[in-house]
Image: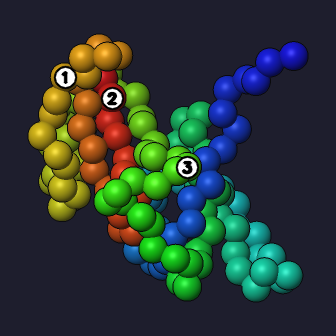
Amino acid sequence: MFLGRQHHIAIIASDWEKAREFYVEKLGFALIREVYRPAQDDYLRMLRQGDTTLELFIRPDAPRRVTDPEAMGLRHLAFHVEDIEPVVRWLNSMGIETEPIRVDAVNGGRFTFFKDPDGLPLELHE
């Protein structure tokens, strides 16, 4: 028995319109399913790009993410890219700020971080 590839990544966001603009319009994820959940009185939205699936939950009253100091749990999401520089230029052209590109001394390659509208750290790794 073993664990296979990731099935999905669940994200709690505060605002559907901001999340849609960021993940769908800017990053290019497609909205593939939207399910109303009456018990929670909310919508679960499934977004996909390639073999990455995001489950997006909208909770305007969710506690804010702790970043400094970092807390236990998921630290960030990392997306593999073949060439980091054009992806950084593409993000910047849409008004998405990125940190300087750095070299990963442990895993090799180059990387940078950017954030979603609620401050969730996202990484590009070459």
Q: Which residue sits at x=70%, y=61%?
A: 33
Residue kind at label 2, given as amino acid type: His
Q: Is residue 24 left or right of residue 9?
A: left
Which image quadrant: the C terminus? top left
Q: Is residue 89 left or right of residue 9?
A: left
Looking at the image, how many numbered discs can be counted on the residues?
3
Q: Using the image, tell me which numbered label, if any, was put on residue 73.
A: 3
Badge nearest the viewer, 1 or 2: 1
Q: Position of residue 51 (x, y in %)?
A: 59, 34
Q: Secondary structure at mark 1?
A: strand
What is the spatial separation of the Cα atoms under label 3 and label 2, in whole angstroms? Answer: 20 Å
Q: Secondary structure at mark 3?
A: loop
Q: Residue furthest front?
A: 69
What is the spatial separation of the Cα atoms under label 1 and label 2, in whole angstroms? Answer: 10 Å
Which image quadrant: the N terminus? top right
- The residue identified by callout 2 is 125
Q: Which residue sits at x=22%, y=57%?
A: 96
In primary-sequence order, the first of circles 1 and 3 is 3
In primary-sequence order, the first of circles 1 and 2 is 1
Q: Position of residue 103 (x, y in %)?
A: 19, 23
Q: Is residue 31 visible?
A: no
Residue 28 drawn above or below residue 87 = below
Q: Position of residue 25 (x, y in %)?
A: 39, 61
Residue 35 drawn above or below residue 69 = below
Label 2 Cα neighbours within 10 Å, binned few <14 / some 14-19 / many ≥20:
many
Q: Secondary structure at mark 2?
A: strand
Q: Using the image, tell me which numbered label, if any, was put on residue 103.
A: 1
Q: Is residue 12 left or right of residue 91?
A: right
Residue kind at label 3, given as amino acid type: Gly
